[in-house]
Amino acid sequence: MPAPPPPMRLVGATVLRDGGLRQRTVAIEGGRISGGPFPAVDLSGFLVLPGLVDLDTARLDCSPGEEASALSNAEDTASANGVTTGWVMVPWGGDPGDPARAEAALRALEAGRARRRIDLRTGLRFDVSAVATAERLVGMVRRFGIGRVVFEGWSDCPPSLASEVPRVLCRMAEALDVLGCTYGSAGDRDGETREFHAMLGARLCERPVSARAAAIARAVGDPVVAPAPALEGGTVEDGAVSAAQLIRLGCCDALSSSGDPARLAPAALALAEQGLGLPAAWRLVSETPAELLRLPGRGRIVCGQRADLCVLSRRTGRIEATLFAGRLIFATGEAACRFSAAATTPALAAE
């Protein structure tokens, strides 16, 4: 077990806390938000924000034997972009979602869990064309304690499976409920598909392709997660409706990076500049996704909670430092200089 990080106070920054931007000190002790006269790190000119909670940080679809390297790269990319809690999504079914390959990826994730620098959680993306392997997938959820499954691939499902898929998904939903696993759908193309998923209990509506699907989700109280890359006006992998449009319609609860964490913070900042305001925009990438996946202590700066933070330069708009459980896991630019200078002061160096 690594030694706990030294106590410190982040001073001089504007802090997103209690629903607003405030000139506050953030004290950290034992890896948690605390209070106390600890040695100070001067972060004047920076914003201190809750660490990002990304529901789709990485897609682990690498070749067998490359899992450890892919996970290390995913962790580096996530921490460099302010993500402190993320989900590695493993494809099951479709291409390249061979179940044996998926199982190898799950074993690699489990083997490296103790060495993780951030909180990387595991989810499965289940292509519904692979209904013949549904029982095997449920077994993997049970074995590895997987907390999240996403149903997708309806549009490419062979007609020969059209009648079988609903029955299998109903049985899967019952089994996942028993295991306490959260499940949802991705890429719903129309209202009818979303209605079926809602009745099934697949509440989380991710990357809806049509505004109608998102509206149906909202009408029945199901949360909608939009892909952050679509904010820039283009389409993403399956032509999902843009997050900006969903927000205007009042049908967006959270953003995910769709496997590209570098886009998440800029998306929130863009929304803030477009009139949403930083507190509300940042909630889409921190507090709300944590709530959707039943992690209520994440995504907020609250005394007693784990000190997962990112430090953003007010001058450049870039994330220059990330702290996970109070430990500095990424730093660059001026923020790196500030933390380095603080670490050489007698008070902090003595800890």
Image (spheres, helix red, strand yellow):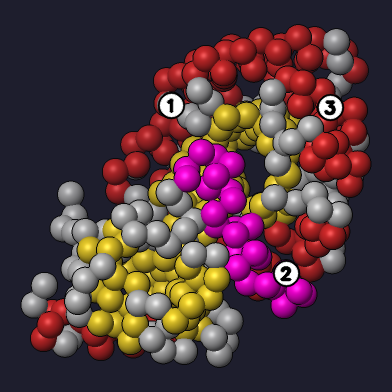
Mark 2 residue element: helix
Magenta highlight on residue 192: no
Q: Which residue is pictured at 62% across the width and 29% down the height?
A: 183
Magenta highlight on residue 274: yes
Please state the extent of the stretch shown in magenta in the rendering.
271-296
The residue beneath circle 2 is: 276
Give residue 230's position: percent from left, percent from top: 78, 60
The residue beneath circle 1 is: 145
Q: Which residue is pictured at 40% across the width and 59% down the height?
A: 302
Callout 1 crowding tier (Cα within 10 Å): few <14, some 14–19, many ≥20: some
Give residue 232's position: percent from left, percent from top: 79, 68
Of residues 233 and 25, the one nearer the viewer is: 25
Q: Which residue is pictured at 40% across the width and 78% down the height?
A: 24
Q: Identify the disc placed on residue 195.
A: 3
Chain-order first, disc 1 or disc 2? 1
Q: Is residue 311 left or right of residue 186?
A: left
Image depth: mark 3 or mark 2 in front: 2
Q: Name the residue type under label 2.
A: Leu
Q: Quadrant of residue 126?
A: top right
CA gap, disc 3 and disc 2: 29 Å
Of residues 52 and 27, the one nearer the viewer is: 27
Task: Kindly report the secondary structure that dominates the magenta region of the rendered protein.
Answer: helix
